[in-house]
């Protein structure tokens, strides 16, 4: 056992013994770990070396064929439970979160979630809903590079050079129906989505052949609509409850043929942090 592994084992035992929340997996469904009376967790950067961020040796991997060249990969426990909370705390406290004003359907509104953007240098800028986020460097947040390395190791042949982070601070934070089909990602983008914290539903819906793109293609920050009823054709809709430490990968023509959302949920009381890794061409 090398020194990095021993260091991570000591960190895991410390969190387990000193944080009563981590002893009960059921609590992370609503994010109740954020009780102010609970012990403060340790900083990731002081205890985790770049070689210690590794997923379980053989995580359960589920592949979902959506048809017509679109598919998903879902790994429910991509990162261990306690290690995932260490990442959550680092991201929650050290990322320079912002809640920007954007334009949706011709009017200005506050985006219903916090965000931050990290990217390699000299890439085509990201612009969505009239908002162009400033791009931070990977070197600004070393743990993000460690997570990126772990994802690339789990997805041989995949490459990512940008990262959009989102923080949902409660039941009323959401992202509406949209597809990440911006030209800077190319025709078949691979998007790896890593979740920390409160469980939230992630719903995909097949695009209508004659859909009005002004309403569904990029309606991600418009007024929240009534919860979507279950489709009469199961193949037209897919729904996942994204677990703490889980990884969901969208591949192929998923962005061309499907839209997705993280809807409001009354019982989602806690905070969720989501990392979406992308490749800008």
Image (tube, rainbow, N blue to C red):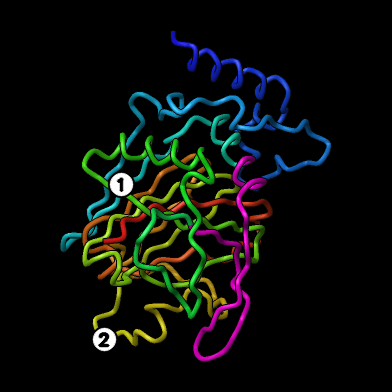
Q: x, y (%) of residue 70?
A: 22, 59
State if disc 2 and disc 1 touch (CB < 8 Å).
no
**Farthest-out residue, front:** 122
* Element type where label 1 sits in the image: strand
Magenta span: 89-117
Using a 10 Å C-alpha cutoff, classify the residue at mark 2 as few (fewer than 14 neighbours), some (14 to 19) or many (20 or more): few
Question: From the viewer's perspective, is residue 116 above or below residue 6?
Answer: below
Q: Say whether residue 178 is left or right of residue 263.
A: left
Question: From the viewer's perspective, is residue 186 above or below residue 279?
Answer: below
Q: Please give the residue where the numbered disc 2 appears in the rendered image.
A: 210
* Element type where label 2 sits in the image: loop
Q: x, y (%) of residue 189?
A: 27, 60
Q: CA distance from mark 1 to mark 2?
A: 28 Å
**Farthest-out residue, left:** 68
Mark toward the start of the polypeptide (1 vs 2): 1
Which image quarter is the C terminus in?
bottom left
Which residue is painted at 55% across and 30% down in the image? Answer: 83
Question: From the viewer's perspective, is residue 23 above or below residue 213?
Answer: above
Which residue is painted at 48% across and 42% down in the image? Answer: 144
């Amino acid at each position: 056992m090398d020194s990095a592994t021993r260091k991570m084992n000591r960190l895991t035992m410390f969190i387990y013994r000193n944080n009563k929340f981590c002893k009960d997996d059921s609590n992370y469904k609503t994010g109740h770990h954020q009780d102010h009376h609970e012990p403060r967790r340790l900083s990731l950067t002081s205890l985790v070396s770049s070689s210690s961020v590794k997923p379980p040796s053989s995580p359960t991997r589920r592949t979902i064929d959506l048809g017509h060249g679109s598919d998903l990969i879902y790994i429910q426990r991509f990162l261990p439970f306690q290690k995932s909370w260490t990442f959550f705390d680092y991201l929650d406290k050290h990322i320079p979160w912002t809640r920007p004003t954007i334009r949706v359907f011709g009017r200005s509104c506050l985006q219903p979630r916090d965000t931050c953007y990290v990217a390699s240098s000299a890439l085509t800028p990201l612009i969505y809903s009239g908002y162009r986020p400033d791009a931070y460097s990977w070197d600004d947040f070393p743990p993000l590079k460690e997570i990126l390395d772990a994802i690339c190791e789990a997805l041989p042949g995949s490459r990512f050079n940008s990262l959009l982070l989102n923080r949902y601070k409660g039941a009323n934070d959401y992202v509406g129906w949209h597809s990440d089909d911006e030209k800077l990602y190319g025709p078949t983008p691979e998007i790896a989505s890593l979740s920390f914290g409160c469980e939230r539903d992630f719903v995909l819906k097949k695009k209508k052949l004659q859909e009005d793109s002004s309403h569904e293609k990029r309606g991600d920050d418009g007024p929240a609509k009534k919860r979507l009823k279950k489709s009469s054709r199961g193949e037209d809709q897919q729904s996942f409850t994204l677990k703490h430490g889980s990884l969901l990968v969208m591949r192929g023509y998923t962005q061309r043929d499907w839209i997705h959302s993280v809807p409001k949920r009354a019982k989602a009381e806690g905070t969720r942090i989501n990392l979406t890794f992308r490749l800008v061409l």
